[in-house]
Image (cartoon, rainbow, N blue to C red):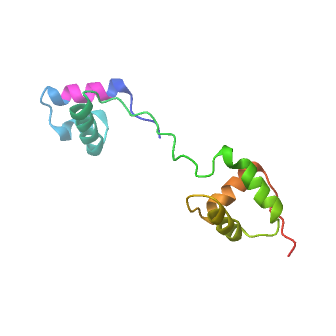
Amino acid sequence: MKAYSIDLRDRVLAALDRGMPRTEVVTTFQVSLASLKRWLAARRDTGDAAPRSPSGGFEPTITPAHDEAVQAQVAAFPDATLDAHAVRWNAAHGPAISQWTIGRAIRRLGLPRKKSR
C-alpha cells in the first residue's frame, strides 16, 4: 500500500488547523480518522507529517559472511534435516537459530536438499 502524498497530508492538516471538525475532514478528504491521528502525532513529535522511509526489514541472522560455513555444513552432512542443521549450527556458532532460518540460508545459496532416505 502506498503512502498518502505529502500534499494531501498538508491539506488535511491545514484544514484541521483552520478549525474544520475531524469528522468533516474525514469525509471531505476520504482519509481515516486513524491516519489523521498519526499525522497529527508525527507533526507534533517531528514537526513534519511526511511518510517515514521504509525500514528494509530485519537484518538476516545468517549473513553472506556465513555462506562458506553453511556450504561446508551442508556438504559435510548432506542427509541432515533442517532441524539437524539448525542444532549443529547452534552448537558451532553464536546465537540460536531455527530450522526455518537455516532453511532460508540454504535456499538463498541454491544448495540441494535431496535426501538419500
Q: Is residue 14 magenta?
A: yes
- Residue placed furthest toward the right: 116
Residue 9 position by quadrant: top left
Magenta stretch, main secondary structure, is helix
Please name whichever residue, 13 or 61, is drawn nearer the observer in this view of the structure: 61
* Residue 43 falls left or right of residue 114: left
Magenta segment, which residues? 9-15
Residue 95 on image: x %, y %: 55, 59
Q: How many labels does the image show?
A: 0
Identified at 85% across, 76% down, the residue is 117
- Residue placed furthest toward the left: 19
Identified at 26% across, 30% down, the residue is 46
Residue 75 on image: x %, y %: 83, 59
* Residue 58 falls left or right of residue 36: right
Residue 100 on image: x %, y %: 63, 62
Residue 87 position by quadrant: bottom right
* Residue 79 falls left or right of residue 34: right
Q: Does the magenta stretch include residue 116?
A: no
Residue 43 position by quadrant: top left
Compared to residue 108, the image places residue 80 above or below, namely: below
Identified at 59% across, 61% down, the residue is 97
Please name whichever residue, 17 or 84, is drawn nearer the observer in this view of the structure: 84
* Residue 52 falls left or right of residue 64: left
Please name whichever residue, 85 or 29, is drawn nearer the observer in this view of the structure: 85
Identified at 31% across, 39% down, the residue is 31
Residue 88 on image: x %, y %: 68, 66
